Amino acid sequence: MEQPQQASLKAKVQKLGSTLSSMVMPNIGALIAWGVLTALFIPDGYLPNESFASMVGPMLTYLIPLLVGYTGGKVIAGERGAVVGAIATMGVIVGTEIPMIMGAMIMGPLGGFTIKKFDAIFQSKIKTGFEMLVNNFSAGLIGFALALVGFQAIGPVVDRLTQAMAAGVETILNAQLIPLTNIFIEPAKILFLNNAINHGILTPLGTEQVSETGRSILFLLEANPGPGLGVLLAFTLFGKGSAKSTAPGAMIIHFLGGIHEIYFPYVMMKPLLFLAVISGGVSGSFVFQLLGAGLRAPASPGSIIAILAMTPMGSYLPVILGVVAGAAASFAVAAVILKADSKEAVDTFEESVKATQEAKLNAKGSAGQTSLTNMSGIQHIIFACDAGMGSSAMGASILRKKINAAGLPQDVTNRAINNLTDAANTLIVTQEELKNRAQQKAPNATFVAIENFLNSPKYDEIVATLSGTDLKETVVAKPAPVLDFDLANINEIVLVHDDRKGSATMGQKVVERILEREALDIPLRKVHINELEATPQTLVISKNSLTQAAKQKVPAAVHLSVDSLITTPKYESVVANLKQIA
């Protein structure tokens, strides 16, 4: 009985955090614009300009809280809620002398909730012809009343609460205890509370701190890419199977792209790695605090590029050293854990994902299988995550390519869970941790829950189900074309790509699966056409447009020209020939 209660509590915490972050995340662009304006034009900025700097105060005082209040109302009750939320937010803005982002996060949803309840009670009772009159006046009067409430009551309370929290942060800073917050932040991130922590809690407090000191360490606590970088580097050097092969690409996406969710599955597959990310977070924050590092505005996404862009002039070294310290500590702990795990003969990342999914399906019985057996009428596919950005966008891109390659008509998009709409013709792909919340928003949709947006075997199953074929048939049963060359001496396979290497990466995964299925151990790699080197024992696979260039580059190699590096049946012919020879 305890497990369902824990799951329910976890879902409620995630829902609260998601509601908070969903008000701030769509408006991160405004915070970044304000941060750039501050960095450039205030008296100690890069390009001091008194006229331009006059926008800094009004943007922080009025624009950003109004946007947050508007978005908060919209999340609850659409456009009418957005308008009422913005009006209500104006009350707390004018009623206090500090930036009212936290006040907006209260008044926006309150405005949306109030107008939603009003509509539920009175919409059915409005006489025909009076709809516009009632709708306009109800929104205006409710917004007016809430603005007064915000001015007189809520604004002063939030003002005192904000001052108390700011004093608490200052006390923690003075006591040199900021690094200890990462003991809670790092595990909470991996439980998909990262956006809630960063944008629901740290961003409002950090913005208040910036208005007083010009920078805030709070913007670095969750956004620091160092802990995740260290774990992925450890997998690159000491990991096994698919986890090892995918880690280098994940590092680039994590560190430069700022999508931290990509390293979460690596940690969850070995729970001891929570110690690694905690060590990295504590170490990084210790260096940040020791050297006085801070940012002028939130770094979103948590990319090193975004972090350096928000770093005040002359403060790059403390920020860089904090990131390096976080990565080094995380790598050291993760390396020890992975090397000590050498007793496990087979523990690939992909197999871990499959095993987890199969166990969950078995536990659910036939009900757990409906997501992949009942897809008749599906017209839209939506990848849903906490924020509707980052990892879900990557997953949508991967499946979209597979859908297009299969010639299927379904469109594939990504969206935040809070923005889901209910429709029976929609397939929603989400992470296991977020499935319950997504089902509450769209109970009539079809769901597929996966462990990892970047690398899931469920994608091929979805394509096979939508196309009305058996998954094994899509891999094995199609007649493979006959090859017109000899593979007797081949000891290596190379996939050639140009500057667009995504298809080569996916093609490499396809060939790897076929080789593993046939128990063939043949080296396989991908390479840019300009760096292509090969021997007569190398099979060079390239798209039609690159084949001629590849032949000129390495004429002695064996060449195979394909229409697509992802979906060609020629891979089956190659592997079948190689197996006969072996």
Image (spheres, rainbow, N blue to C red):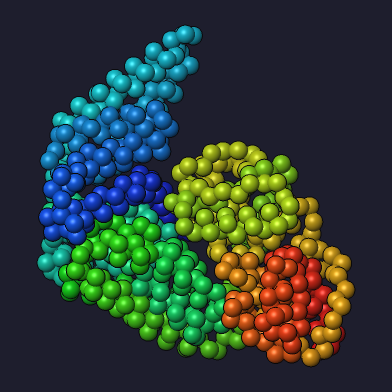
Q: Quadrant of residue 477?
A: bottom right
- Would residue 75 appear left or right of 66 to someone viewing this image? right
- Kindly identify the residue that appears in the image at 44 percent across and 51 percent down: 387
- Kindly identify the residue that appears in the image at 76 percent across and 76 percent down: 560
- Would residue 439 appear left or right of 10 to someone viewing this image? right
Q: Residue 357: where, in percent of width, then height?
A: 61, 64
Q: Is residue 98 above or below residue 493?
A: above
Viewport quadrant of the C terminus: bottom right
Q: How many marks?
A: 0
Q: Residue 111: where, in percent of width, then height?
A: 32, 31
- Kindly identify the residue that appears in the image at 57 percent across and 55 percent down: 396
- Kindly identify the residue that appears in the image at 41 percent across and 63 percent down: 258
- Observer-nearest residue: 52 or 409? 52
Q: Residue 293: where, in percent of width, then height?
A: 20, 68
Q: Is residue 189 above or below residue 282?
A: above
Q: Is residue 579 above or below residue 405?
A: below
Residue with the most extreme front position: 552
Q: Quadrant of residue 565?
A: bottom right
- Does the image show residue 479? yes
- Would residue 563 appear left or right of 387 to someone viewing this image? right
- Observer-nearest residue: 295 or 283? 295
- Observer-nearest residue: 480 or 452? 480
Q: Residue 86: where, in percent of width, then height?
A: 30, 32
